[in-house]
Amino acid sequence: MSRQRTRAVPAWRFHLMVVALLALLALLLGRILSLQVLDTEHGREFLQQQGDQRTVRVAEIPAYRGLITDRRGEPLAVSTPVISLWADPRLLVEVEDLQPLAKALEMPLTDLQARLDRFERKGFMYLRRHLVPEVARKVLDLRVPGVGGFREYQRYYPAGEVTAHLLGFTNIDGEGIAGLELQYESVLRGVPGKKRYIKDLRGNAVRYIGVDQPARPGADLALSIDLRLQYQHHQELQRAMAVTGASGGTIVTLDARTGEVLAMVNHPVFNPNQTSAPKPSHTRNRAMTDMYEPGSTMKTFTLVAALESGRWSTESMIDTSPGYIRVGRKTLPDPRNYGEISVSRVIEKSSQVGVTQLAQDLGHEPILEVFSRFGFGQPMVTGFPGESAGFLPSRNRWSAIEKVTLAFGYGLTATPLQLARAYSAFANDGQLPQVSLLRVADADAADTAVPVVSADLAREVRDVLHRVTGEHGTARRARVDGYDVGGKTGTVHKVGPGGYQDKKYLALFAGMAPIDNPRFVTVVVIDEPQGEAYGGGAAAAPVFARVAAGTLRLLNVAPDQPEAVLAQADTTARRGVEG
């Protein structure tokens, strides 16, 4: 009896399962009938949607990064199309021979296998980034399952190291991470688009369906620099590094009227087109980030405080005998005893004794006020990454020596660009321009300039600066054949861990040309020149002379003494024939 009951149970269950399956089949057939016959449009949409979810994918369309040009439209940063190769490691494990793929990738087979092993549980990995299309095509033509490619853009800098510190660079994903590329990232980057495509079972795109959203390219930037001047400044700075044996240097030139940066170069340099990471110390735009004590270049601003006091004129006499002066426990010497000389000659000779007497008469507060008025200790608000504001001292108690050394450029710091801007006020008849790294219209520049001294005083200071570059001035090596120029030298002991260093100097020169109606202002900084020619007059002034000569020529500025230019050209021609 028990065996009969056991055999009856499976038969009952079997019939129940048959009924259930028939019911499910009826429901399925009814759904298909509903989708394809009773509601054809809705049914097709439903089935299409279900299929698309399994085969249709959305891909990003890269946006073209905006072009960066110089003021004349010469390209400085462009985006070139490249191909990046990817792989699905889960599919590549089925490939028996990876040697052809490794060869096409120009990669050792062991390295390729190691990378695949590292990403074996991932559905995506990069094989190579930013390949030129011809090289990428060699890989894609192998038709290896699980290997594909897509288009990207790679940033390229035609001028290389010549514009590197100003432009900065992007990372491998095309995002600005330094310089103007970082500052204007939101402007340059553009907006990626979207497109749909059908993929096969191996993940490869077999057909593109359409574009849902076109990519929007980034905006272009027109910079203030002139690439011709940039190359010329770069060449002269490299020459100066070789001649002086210096560890670094900077040259920056501003349009005297608009405040536009016409050229800005630094040393050491780096090549932004190289894939290897440069040394951080080489990527700094020293003209804007590094702060230095400006030394005797600040005596020009002490002169402004003296003239504005009403107690001094450029012809007022100062007795500098016996060639040195004691302030507290310090003795401040001149190179020799100049005796009784005018205030103008004090600046011409860069007399420590003369400037000390001016500072003692004026006090430190009027001098500080002038420094601040000309923009020292304040940010220039260019927005450049890492831009420094410099430093102006502010203390309740000043020692006698601190009050005096402030007058000739110690105890404060400034960037080379700040110094150039401040000197632009003298070149621009007392108007302090707003510095710009972008090309601006003359009218816009006039609206942003700030009056800091009268036009008459500015011209009076220019006359003194012209004397500094005369036969008896400290900057006679800054002279340019056929042109009247002016400027001021500076020589500074560098600060080290234990204070000022005896054998390490900073040589500076701030100048302008032509002196009667300046078109530009140039600041030269030579960091740690070697040998005996370490001063501003010996190391920096000659660099200004060569830079200014080239700038005047490229800007097509008529000479003040045409006969001198012709004589120099004739001499050069004769040397060429004789050589």
Image: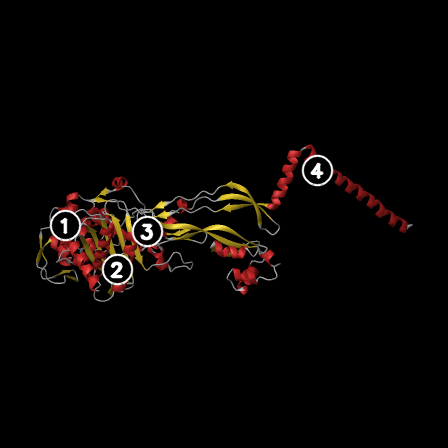
Q: Which residue is mark 4?
A: 32
Foreground: disc 3 or disc 2: 2
Q: Earlier in the sequence, mark 4 or mark 1?
A: 4
User: What distance separates the C-alpha of mark 3 from that of mark 1?
Assistant: 32 Å
The residue lying at 75 percent from left, 38 percent from top is 26
Can residue 390 be seen from the camera position used here? no
**In the image, which is nearer the foreground, mark 4 or mark 3?**
4
Say what amino acid the circle numbered 3 marks: Glu
Mark 3, residue position: 387
Residue underneath mark 2: 526
> Which is in the foreground here, disc 2 or disc 4?
4
Q: Which mark is residue 463?
A: 1
Give the quadrant of residue 325. Answer: bottom left
Question: Marks 3 and 2, how far apart in space?
Answer: 20 Å
> Which amino acid, by three-letter code, is at mark 2?
Ile
Q: Quadrant of the C terminus?
A: bottom left
- How far apart are the two marked residues, 4 and 3, measured between alpha carbons? 69 Å
Which residue sits furthest right?
Answer: 1
Q: Are marks 4 and 3 in contact (CB under 8 Å)?
A: no
Q: Nearer the viewer, residue 447 or 110?
A: 110
